[in-house]
Amino acid sequence: MKKMIPLTLIFIAGLLGVISFVIPHPSYQVYDEWIRNDLLRVLSAFAVVLALGSLLRVHFDKIKRKRRNWQFSWLLLFAFAASAAIGLFGGVAADGILPTAIGSFRFDIQTLYENIVIPLASSMFALLAFFMASAAYRAFRVRSMEATLLLTAAFIVMIGLLPLGYSISKHLPEFVQWILNVPNVAGQRGIVFGIALGVIATSLKIILGIERAWLGGGE
Amino acid sequence: MTIDRRIIYAILLAVVTLPLVFPSVLEVTPMTPVEKLFTAVDKTTDDKALILDCSYSPQIKAEVEPMAIAVLRHAFQTRKKILVLSLYVEMIGLATRAINQVVEEFNISAQTYEDSIIYGRDYVFLGWQPPPIVPMLGMGESIANIYVVDYYGNQTDTLHMMEKIRNYNDISILVALSGSRIPISWVAYAQNRYGLQVGVGCTAVSGADFYPYYQTGQFTGLMVGMKGAAEYEELVETNYGVKGRRVASEAMLSLTYAHLAIMLFIVIGNIGFFLHRRKK
């Protein structure tokens, strides 16, 4: 029974999802719209609550048991509480009941996002450029003919896609577009077909209850 | 031959930052995929709108935000109605930022009410509606049903622009800006079912994945990476004389030197590899 209910639900939901693309009749589409516009949105709202609850539980537990780096969990909880309060009560356009400015110092949700989230996230990603340069120097070795061809094509594409490529030759960017439109598309298309067939097979297995890993293991 | 990685980091830091400190705008020649996207946006008629999906995260802001700003400038300059949305909550702040910047640019130089960019008349910010499949499919039937209120809490169907913009039939093109496979989802759901035209702005890393869809015409046009953004900026300024800071174009020199530096490191590494192999 414990497994039958979720398996039955997934079968019905999968079937309804597939049928909605096959039956365009309005009498069925009304139900499809209700499932998508109402039911799915309610489920998403619950999923957000569940995700937040899980996150808070993990960090409270970390603090309680004083696990490694537990101090950062306090920082996370404070940031969570502060941004939630400012976002919920400060308003998206700083027009909520909570004041979000002291003189010219503003701390509404958009200001916090632009001055904290964006610089931090951008900086983390920018570090990758240095790691990539170091990795390129250490790891890209032409040990075979295929590696030579790959590296040559990579150099041509890199230069051709820059403004420098047009300065070297007007035909270089066109040649690069040909590489992207023909050999690249040929290879990508094969991969996409393979992935699509894999997705169809896995989806069918899940809908029909053959694949049950998503149920979770254990008791 | 080994080079201390700190030297590599220092060289890369210099080649990236010096061109930004001493800027010089490189001439950029628009390529066909960007021209096609520009033309498709340009063909938006007065009775239709275009949708801008700002689903790019702060991590890829440097590459993709210039695209959003260029498209917004294009739309506002040519008075094309535009709807802006994000499919994920993390990206809402970036969409807000891009809109606020471009609206301020236009309104600072506006002389009359007609010249100004007015919310509800010229653009609507729909906001975020989870999960992504809900707006992708739901807007095909009714945009106001999916986004009952806009990002600022206004009833969507009371906004002036939305009187005539009901669903995808009233949308000329959707431009999806993303670093992930979201544009493919727009094709799979919105274009497949409702025939919506889709254009894409993406990171350079994910650009190669989208060429099959561009080749078949499923993507009307394609802006790839910061170069794509610079090309669109060039087209907007050349065709409509829109003056504004061209962030992507300014960064082209920095990008060029960084690419050349990485290529040089690879060549040096391989020279060392061959010399070492010969010694053995």
Image: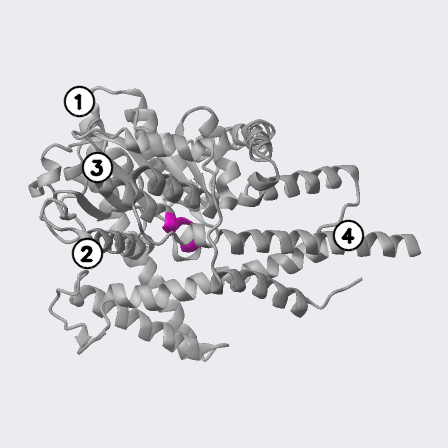
In space, the residues marked 1 and 2 are separated at their CA atoms by 51 Å
Mark 1, Cα crowd under 10 Å, few <14 / some 14-19 / many 20+, is few
Q: Which residues are magenta?
A: B60-66
Q: Quadrant of residue B188?
A: top left
Observer-nearest of A187 and B46: B46
Query: How is the protein colored in the picture?
Result: one colour
Q: Which residue is mark 4?
A: B270
Residue B68 visible = yes
Query: Is A94 left or right of B227, judged from the image as shown?
Result: left
Both on one chain, marks 1 and 4?
Answer: no
Mark 2 chain: B
Residue A33 x/y as whole percent:
21, 33
Q: Report in which chain the residue with disc 4 lies.
A: B
> The disc numbered 3 marks a residue on which chain?
B
Q: CA distance from mark 3 to mark 4?
A: 52 Å
Q: Which numbered disc covers residue A27?
A: 1
- Which one is closest to the eye, mark 3 or mark 4? 3
Residue at figure coordinates x 19%, y 53% from the top left? B109
The circle on residue A64 is: none
Which dot, 1 or 2, sits closer to the camera?
2
Between disc 3 and disc 2, whose residue precedes?
A: 3
Same-chain status of marks 3 and 2: yes
Which residue shows up at 53% across the image and 37% down it?
B208
Q: Mark 3 is on which residue type?
A: Lys
